[in-house]
Amino acid sequence: MAIDRRCFLKGASAFAFSSGLIGCSSNSDNDDDNGGNQPEFDYTRHVTCPRNCGDRCSLLVTTEDGVATAITGDERHPVTGSAPCVKGHAYLQYIYSPDRLQQPLKRVGPRGPGARFEPVSWDEALNAIASNLNKIIEEHGGNAISYYKYSGNGGLSAAASGYRFFNRIASRRLEENICASAGYHGMTSILGEYIGPSPEDYVNTQCYVSWGTNEQATNIHHIKFINQARDKGAKVLVVNSARTPMASQADIWLQPTPGTDAMLALGICKVLIEDNLHDTDFISKYTQDFDALQERVDQFSHGQIAEHTGVSTSEYRAFAHAYAGVDAAMIRIGYGLQRTRNGGRIVRAIPMLAALTGNFGRPGAGVIYLNGQGNARNGGAANGGHLTPEGAKRDTISINEFARGLVAADYQQPDGTVGPMAYGESSELIKAFVCWNSNPMAVAPNTTLLEQGLMRDDLFTVGLELFMTDTMEYMDYVLPATSFIEQEDTCSSYHAYYTQHTHKQIEPLYQSRPNLEIFSALAKKMGFSDPEFSETIEQVNRNAWAGDISYDEFKQQGFYTPPNIEYPWRASLTWPTPSGKIEFKDTSGSYFDPEQFHPVIDVGTPESDTRQNYGLTEGEKLREFRLLSPAHAKMNNSQWANIKYTRNLPAHTLYIHPQDAAAKGIQTGDSVVLTATRHNNEEASIRYSAKVEPMTPAGTLFVWKCAWKKTNPNGSGTAINMITNCDLTDMNHGSSFHATRVDISLA
């Protein structure tokens, strides 16, 4: 019998879908289960990848008979083009994974790896959760309940849903600053802002500087703009302690000792001034305290700078001349380099290169860190801050030291304080933990300590997830959430200037529900009748829309850029600083203590600084190697770690420089143990497979971040963030993953 291509695709996709759903079950109370009973509708429409990635890809999903059969890039979108990244290509395996959670679960055995669960109905799960939370609120107040959430789904409703609920119960607040917060203050302390040009402006640059970022892993769609500039003759300069693909292709690559970037920036500034490469007219008109910068660079010899950074004077001199020798140069500052104890001071030093050379206010020039100019939504209104009861006591805890705040009441902190702590002070005991849009047992620092808190018998735990992650094994109840194509939503890019829309392409699989529906149903179970808990996902997004076209027009076209964004960025040559100029010296005290750190460029490192100045403990300093743990192109933080198409990534591999490997007698394939000194001088160790490769300078080790413990092929049940630290950065309470020091030995 003849069969046309359309019929073949429908049949093949239905077979593929149904075969992946074998074992799907339904509860006796007839909860909706759409695993194998999808409605028939066929179309291709736009969606937006909501992951923590500045590309924020606009995608097209083809749905046939209610099954998503293809995901491609939306070639109308200037950034995405026609192809997603490798993770986007794996989305169908992600969405239809046999590992998807199919129904609410209740834990019936001990918490932790290998925990056992039994299926329950939605009513049973929500009633039990509501009862437990209401009891805690009655006995201890809402402040005893804490949530843990980050960027697992960046859609507006996916995030606002939880904020509304936790505002209503007046829970403890979470400072969500794990990613880039030290850099926010570092940038703002000199420029008055951390936003800048769009990556689409890379095509106009004559010199692209990649400082502390790995575009292949974190912004792969921006590489085409860099290549277009390069085709026109632009130079590519890289500063990175790790060997990235961009570093391998660079015209000049500087590889400083980790944490010494501020001193390297000072050295480049010194060359720019000494070799008369600076723009004196720009400096006199648009900057302040140039004399303070000149005095600061004069305090160090080139020999001292080279010794401190591991970069020779001739190397950074060549870099300075290449950077200053063009009319338009663009610096892209990554987030990884500021995830260290001196991260804010590092980022603060880098824009000084642009200020000295006048690289602002023209096409292809400027400094890019993180942008928000494209956001056309009022997220504050959507989050429901007005729902907080008047006079409610609400403390705040940083996501980066959450482990310290989750410990038991009798835990003794390093300073002798007993019980949980936040920001160096005693804090109230957390009695309930609700996790959504995150996998903290893989992504949080110092999961060794975090696990101690999650194992407390007096802690009630709830998780919303698509998969049984490392974290979900510590939950009392696990609720199945939808993927991003199973609901409508909106996202904004934090690099390019776009707000983007996602159509609901398929019905929720199995018994999964969107975050908004879960939290709204829970709120009603707890007795809340606020109208916000009856809003639909579309209503939340429609009410938050702030663009100058209608929400329906936006929904139709798929992506939107607000009008009147200044181009070139800072063409006005004014800055939102107190003086209206670029400020080489900051004595405001708004971002750091100028008595504690040098107000121009502070060159302290975690190894050289005292503990009071955000340095490492003496126990940490005794460890032999600095450890870096950047992003891998096949994962987005901990997401995709369990997906077949991307699972063969070397997530549990330790890269060691040949010089260090020879000294330690380590060969590729050896099983090695990494040991660190963690909070309270406690030791923690992980077991990885070694690979002898110069990914970093000698004296520095390299692993990929956010691996799952349960997928470690060494069978050790260990992963990188068991040994990272939960100390805060010098500015804005950021994370300090890359300030970790370890010893290494053969297993």
Image: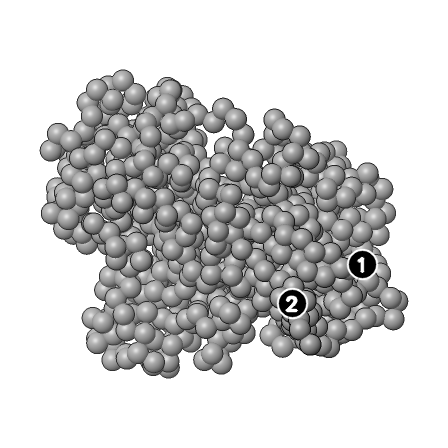
Task: Tell me where residue 602 appears, x and y as whole percent.
Answer: 29, 40
Viewport quadrant of the N terminus: bottom right
Question: Looking at numbered disc 1 in the image, what kind of residue is underneath it?
Answer: Leu
Task: Tell me where residue 736 appears, x and y as whole percent.
Answer: 42, 53
Cα distance in 3D space between marks 1 and 2 = 47 Å
Front residue of 165 and 366: 366
SS category of the residue bearing label 2: loop
691 vs 330: above or below: below
Disc 1: which residue: 126
Q: Quadrant of residue 363?
A: top left
The answer to whether 685 appears left or right of 37 in the picture is left
289 vs 51: above or below: above
Q: What residue lies at 49% left-to-right and 81% top-to-bottom?
A: 715
Q: Are marks 1 and 2 in contact (CB under 8 Å)?
A: no
Q: What residue lies at 52% left-to-right and 67% top-to-bottom?
A: 641
Mark 1 or mark 2: which comes first in sequence?
2
* Crowd around label 1: few <14 · some 14–19 · many ≥20 (10 Å): many
Task: Tell me where residue 99 appears, x and y as whole percent.
Answer: 63, 71
Disc 2: which residue: 4
Q: What residue lies at 40% left-to-right and 40% top-to-bottom?
A: 199
